[in-house]
Image (cartoon, rainbow, N blue to C red):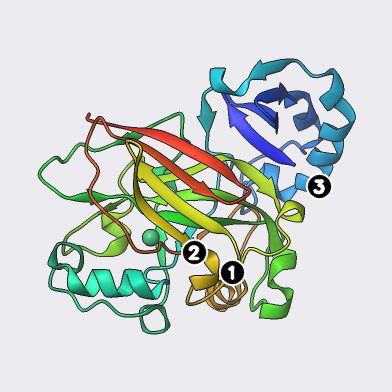
Amino acid sequence: MRICRFNDDRLGLVEGDQVADVSAALKVLPASRWPLPHGDLLVAHLDAVTAEIGRIAAAAPRHKLADVRLHSPVANPGKIIAAPVNYTLHLNEARDDKQIHHGAFVKPIDEAGLFLKATSSLVGPGDGVVIDRPDRRVDHEVELTVIIGRGGRNIAEKDALAHVAGYAVGLDISVRGPEDRSFRKSRDTFTVLGPWLTTADEVPDPGHLDLGLTVNGEKRQGSNTELLIWGVEKLIAYASSTYTLYPGDVLMTGTPEGVSPIVPGDRIDAFVEGLGHLQVEVRGQ
Ligand code: MN
């Protein structure tokens, strides 16, 4: 099932080139009061929501996919976890290009660990990426992105995929420079998730997916998740050895080689096999 959030926070079921408005399925969510539980309420109750979607979808009003504005399918992630250097060829290009490494020693993931991006940086493709510091180099990074379903701590690799709610295409937009990753990659709009959440049952093996990215129609990145240094299972195990994972936590698995600058006016098309094309415009202010 492909689930999106569109227009004024409507819940959508994506079928071909159409979106069924299944917002009525949200009635299965429990009422919440402060303090809210950790995690995203929709993802925490995804099984009940998808069951209700199954009951109401046939009679739901429909829109053309091209006519709706897509927001991040996860509205309220507790955290956005990201892998810094998780493809060997990206490690090599980062070490070779001073504009990327900026004088810092670029360490592979087993030495660098993970980092966190601010949840306030998260947008969907319909919201756009804003580059308001034209004096700094800003790069695209396409990444297979995991949405945690069932939370946990110290999750074993063999159990990891059972904790996944679904997958989406992610963009880890990055200012290059000397500051910490969490600062450079957390500007508003610098985490793009979408175009929708594809439920995990449709992705039996996240370890063999083509992914890539074009800017203004020109190919910049192209790889396959079989080239991840640490795959999805190991990333979940490693992340959960430090952070308790909660429903709706977003895990970005790292970018392959081919990162390059983007500027206002660019149009990015990023894809992961089976998860759709995330199309987003880059704006100035
Ligand atoms: Mn990245």
Who's the residue at 32% across and 74% down the image? 91
Does the numbered disc 1 mark a residue whose Cβ is under 8 Å from ligand 1? Answer: no
Residue 215 percent location from the top left of the image: 33, 41
Horizontal placement of 109 versus 198: left or right? left
- In depth, the one of 202 and 155 nearer the eye is 202
Q: Which residue is mark 3?
A: 47
For disc 3, the neighbor class at 10 Å (few under 14, some 14 to 19, many from 20) is few
Residue at the left extreme of this rendering: 135
Amino acid, disc 1: Val
Q: Earlier in the sequence, mark 2 or mark 1?
A: 1
For disc 2, the neighbor class at 10 Å (few under 14, some 14 to 19, many from 20) is many
**Circles 2, 1 touching at the beta carbon (< 8 Å):** yes
**Circles 3, 1 touching at the beta carbon (< 8 Å):** no
Instruction: Confirm whether residue 156 shows in the render.
Output: no
Who's the residue at 30% across and 56% down the image? 259
- In depth, the one of 223 and 183 nearer the eye is 223
Horizontal placement of 34 versus 129: left or right? right
Does the numbered disc 2 mark a residue whose Cβ is under 8 Å from ligand 1? Answer: no
Q: Quadrant of ligand 1?
A: bottom left
**In this view, the mark in front (3 or 1):** 1
Who's the residue at 46% across and 34% down the image? 125
Horizontal placement of 227 versus 285: left or right? right
Q: Which residue is mark 2?
A: 253
Instruction: Confirm whether residue 222 shows in the render.
Output: yes
Q: Secondary structure at mark 2?
A: loop
Q: Which residue is mark 1?
A: 232
Residue 13 percent location from the top left of the image: 72, 31
**In this view, the mark in front (2 or 3):** 2
Amino acid, disc 2: Thr
Give the Cα separation between the discs numbered 3 and 1.
22 Å
Give the Cα separation between the discs numbered 2 and 1.
7 Å
